[in-house]
Amino acid sequence: MPRLPDLIHAGDRPVPPRLGGGSEWVLGRCWLWCANRHTWVLWLGPAATTGHHASLYACEHCVDRLHHTIIDDGEAMTDAPLDATGIRVPLYLSPGDPPRPVPLRYRHARHRRPRTALGRLWHRLITGREAPPGA
C-alpha cells in the first residue's frame, strides 16, 4: 500500500491549484477519474449511497472534467427534443415514467461541440443520430 508523503513542514507542501473564489484545497486522495492519486483535492460536497455517507473530494483535473460535463448537460437540456405537444423530453426517465412520446422533433443543437464523452452521447440523442433508450 502506498504511503502518503510526509509533509510536516509548510515549505514542503506544493502550491494548491487556483480554481474558483477562495476554495479550500486540502491534501488527500481524489475520488474520481484520476485513479485516486494523492494531490491537492477540493471538497465537492456530501455523497450518499444506500445507508452510507461520505465527503467527496476531487483533484483539479477531475473538477475541471466534472465542470465541463455539467456545462454539456445544461446545453443538452436546452436543446432536448420536443414531443408532439412541444414539451421538452427529458434525457433521463424513471422506471415508472411512460415511454418516450412519439413523434419527437429534433432540433439542430445550438451549442458548441460537446466537451466530454457523456456530452457527445447526449448530443447524438438530441440531434436524432441515435435512438433514445426505450424508443
Image: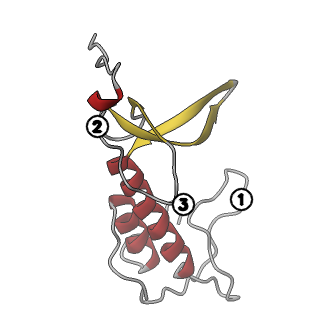
The label nearer to you, 3 versus 1, is 1
Residue sitting at x 51%, y 44%: 24
Residue sitting at x 38%, y 55%: 18
Q: How is the image coloured?
A: secondary structure
Q: Amino acid at mark 1?
A: Asp
| Residue annotated with mark 2 | 14
Spatial CA span between label 1 and label 2: 50 Å
Residue density around tag 3, few if under 14, some if 14–19, many if 20 or more, within 10 Å = few
User: Where does residue 93 sit, x and y in percent of width and height?
Assistant: 63, 59
Residue density around tag 1, few if under 14, some if 14–19, many if 20 or more, within 10 Å = few
Q: Nearer the viewer, residue 14 or 103?
A: 14
The label nearer to you, 2 versus 3, is 2
| Residue annotated with mark 3 | 134
Q: Nearer the viewer, residue 4 or 131?
A: 4
Residue density around tag 2, few if under 14, some if 14–19, many if 20 or more, within 10 Å = few
Who comes first in sequence, dot 3 or dot 1?
A: 1
Label drawn at residue 97: 1
- Does the residue at mark 1 contact the one at mark 2 (Cβ under 8 Å)? no
Q: Nearer the viewer, residue 85 or 25?
A: 25
In which quadrant of the rendered image does the N terminus lie?
top left
Where disc 3 sits, the SS reads loop
The label nearer to you, 1 versus 2, is 2
User: Where does residue 71 sit, x and y in percent of width and height?
Assistant: 47, 69
* Residue 132 seen in this snapshot: no
| Residue lying furthest top | 1
Q: Amino acid at mark 3?
A: Gly
